[in-house]
Image (spheres, rainbow, N blue to C red):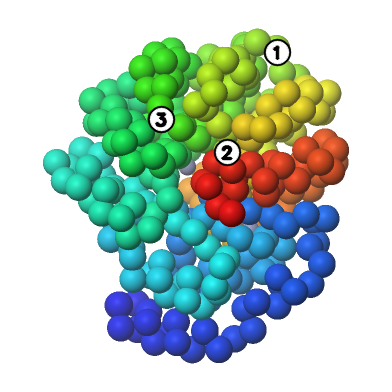
């Protein structure tokens, strides 16, 4: 779809009853903010997932020039979408492009998913810029391929990210993906993308969330769902301890908010969630794992505080 077609689709979609969900009682007992929702190429697809999954408001993760598409989505469903922007961190104009995105209304950087080291020079300049612009930065940490030769992303989380947290105290980091969530368990050594079984206390992620005010956790994708599904006793305690620093997100690729299509594409290791909507699975999991008060913070309140949304 080119820009003109997209805007025409936007005009058509704008007359559809997109606000119905907001008028009805929230399905989850609380309004829900999805902090990890990738902008979809078809305008109506963005609303279809939100409405189907019972999500009130979402953060559109975009890459490169996306302002026209963001504006079209926001016009079609007023008040229901904010956005983050990312840009190839290896490019010399990355800082300029992301600064412009924030001027245009982006409320954070992300998702930052590039084949570089988490403590390398490319990302370090983004951490500094995020602090200067006072926006959070959402990071994808992954050390194990989902398919042959995929490569790794923001590598070195377990070994080196503490030095980053220390070195950039004014930067707010939102951690996400396989390496972030597998490291809630102390005995993880990058064996698989999604480890199973009981969690051994003292994992790097758990410790960093406790020790560093500038780190939050995004519970999206199979990685977040898997980590919180392993050990109910651990999960209840983890959600309680980090209740002010965890954010619900879906990272779901299903089309209708009910599991149709590929919820985690190109990721055979995530078969446990195939045919299901990650948003629904994780909302159900959180709801049964914690109190209504903590649930409401994680799925709604925390994101508003972090992103300074009134
Ligand atoms: Zn990711
Ligand atoms: Zn879904």
Mark 2 residue element: strand
Quadrant where the C terminus lies?
A: bottom right
- Disc nearer the start of the sequence (3/2): 3
Asked if one can make out residue 175 in the rendered structure from this viewpoint, the answer is yes
Q: Nearer the viewer, residue 92 or 155?
A: 92
Circles 1 and 3: CB distance less than 8 Å?
A: no
Task: Judge by depth and name the residue closer to the eye, 1 or 24.
Answer: 24
Q: Which residue is mark 2?
A: 218
Residue 54 percent across, percent down from the top left:
72, 63
Looking at the picture, does residue 244 appear above or below residue 43? above
Q: Which residue is mark 1?
A: 200
Residue positioned 80% across, 28% down in the render: 236
Label 3 within 8 A of ligand 1 by Cβ: no
Left or right relative to 291: residue 12: left
* Labels 1 and 2: the sequence-earlier one: 1
Task: For ligand 1, tell me if the residue under mark 2 lies within 8 Å.
Answer: no
Whether residue 236 sits left or right of residue 207 in the image: it is: right
Q: Position of residue 90 (x, y in %)?
A: 20, 38
Instruction: Give the CA distance from mark 3 to mark 2.
Output: 16 Å
Give the label, 1 or 2, closer to the camera.
2
CB atoms at circles 1 and 2 under 8 Å apart?
Answer: no
Measured Cα–Cα span from mark 1 to mark 3 = 29 Å
Residue 267, relative to residue 155: is it above or below?
below
């Amino acid at each position: 779809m080119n820009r003109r077609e997209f805007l025409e689709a936007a005009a058509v979609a704008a007359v559809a009853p997109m606000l119905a969900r907001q008028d009805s009682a929230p399905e989850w007992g609380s309004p829900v903010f999805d902090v990890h929702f990738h902008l979809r190429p078809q305008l109506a697809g963005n609303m279809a997932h939100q409405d189907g999954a019972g999500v009130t408001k979402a953060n559109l993760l975009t890459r490169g020039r996306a302002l026209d598409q963001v504006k079209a989505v926001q016009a079609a469903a007023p008040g229901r979408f904010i956005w983050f922007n990312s840009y190839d961190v290896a490019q010399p104009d990355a800082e300029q492009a992301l600064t412009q995105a924030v001027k245009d209304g982006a409320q954070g950087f992300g998702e930052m998913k590039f084949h570089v080291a988490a403590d390398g020079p490319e990302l370090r300049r983004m951490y500094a810029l995020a602090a200067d612009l006072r926006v959070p930065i959402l990071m994808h940490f992954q050390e194990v391929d989902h398919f042959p030769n995929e490569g790794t992303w923001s590598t070195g989380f377990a070994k080196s990210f503490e030095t980053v947290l220390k070195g950039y105290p004014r930067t707010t980091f939102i951690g996400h993906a396989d390496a972030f969530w597998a490291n809630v368990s102390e005995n993880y050594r990058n064996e698989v993308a999604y480890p199973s079984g009981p969690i051994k206390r003292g994992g790097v992620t758990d410790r960093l969330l406790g020790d560093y005010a500038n780190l939050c956790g995004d519970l999206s994708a199979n990685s977040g769902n898997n980590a919180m599904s392993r050990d109910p006793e651990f999960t209840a305690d983890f959600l309680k301890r980090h209740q002010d620093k965890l954010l619900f997100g879906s990272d779901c690729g299903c089309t209708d908010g009910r599991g149709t299509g590929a919820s985690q594409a190109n990721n055979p290791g995530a078969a446990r969630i195939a045919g299901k909507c990650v948003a629904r699975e994780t909302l159900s999991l959180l709801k049964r794992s914690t109190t209504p008060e903590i649930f409401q913070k994680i799925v709604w309140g925390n994101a508003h505080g972090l992103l300074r949304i009134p």
